[in-house]
Amino acid sequence: MIVTGAALSRSSIVERYRRNRGRSRALFDLVSDEAYYRRPIAWRHPIAFYEGHLPAFAFNTLAKRALGRPSIDARFETLFARGIDPDESATPVEMTWPARKDVLSFADEVDRQLIDLMEHADCADAVFTVLEHEAMHQETLLYMWHRLPFADKKRPRSYTVSVAGGASGTEWIDVPGASRRWERIRSRSRSAGITSSHDARPRSRTSRSSATTPRTGGSSSSWTPAATGRSSGGRRKIGDG
Ligand SMILES: [Fe+2]
């Protein structure tokens, strides 16, 4: 039994670790081979770094520092040990990163050894640091991927387009207080000088369909009628958004 605040069994720790690792692998598998060494965000490392960083951090933290175990690959454990961001005081240094197959081979050995330690050694708090670190990086990876051009991303292996069934249903539901909140937002927008094209035209439609919402990617003064959703009448359309 591993105890930190709340008791967790070894099997549940290993299950969480495996789940983390599987999710990370799925994220990296979304990136094309060509994009693997690119920097979607200039002041972040190339994508290759993060696939090595996760197992390297885990191994350095749990196996080496907490339990005094020997290295698997001292070069990788150093190369991938640096923090989340490159040194912001200097221009990012272009360097040669390992081939992905070598990174994955290192990661596989880290996983094998760490799972063995989680099952048999006294891992103490270090195991929670490892679990939390990987989950936090997964969030970071997602917004890095968001900056990648669409062509640099791959469809997940398990993804299938569902075309079965008919169109989703729609119905109007009451949202308590929505009308008052929406009017406050409109009032603040007008006070800030943001004009709405909707406000400028006659209100010939019912209050239910008169809501407006900012157009994503447009200028702050450009507004467009909502396709679905909010309603100045305090109602919200569901099932089609
Ligand atoms: Fe990190």
Image: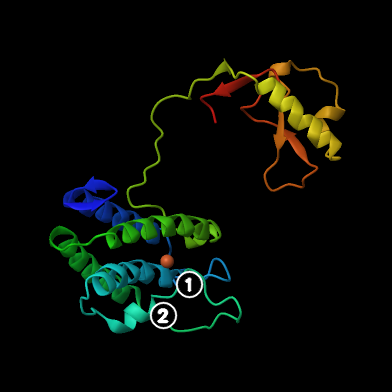
Could you say which is closer to the camera, residue 116 or residue 222?
116
Could you say where residue 107 lies in the image, as x and y percent from the top left? 28, 69
The residue sitting at 36% across, 81% down in the picture is 78
Could you say which is closer to the camera, residue 9 or residue 88?
9
Cα gap from disc 2 to disc 1, whole angstroms: 9 Å
Instruction: Give the image's coloring scheme.
Output: rainbow
Q: Is residue 37 left or right of residue 130?
A: right
Work out which quarter of the rendered image holds the C terminus and state it. Answer: top right
Confirm whether residue 137 shows in the render: yes
Secondary element type, mark 2: loop
Seen in the picture, residue 185 relative to 138 is either above or below; the reply is above
Rendered image quadrant of residue 42: bottom right
Q: Residue 93 carries which label?
A: none
Q: Residue 97 carries which label?
A: 2
Could you say where residue 53 lies in the image, as x and y percent from the top left? 38, 70
The residue sitting at 60% across, 81% down in the picture is 91
Q: Label 1: how many residues lie within 10 Å, few (<14), some (14-19) or many (20+)?
A: many
Q: Which mark is residue 46?
A: 1
CB atoms of marks 2 and 1 within 8 Å: yes
Secondary element type, mark 1: loop
Seen in the picture, residue 129 relative to 95 is either above or below; the reply is above
Q: In this view, does 95 lie to the left or right of 118?
A: right
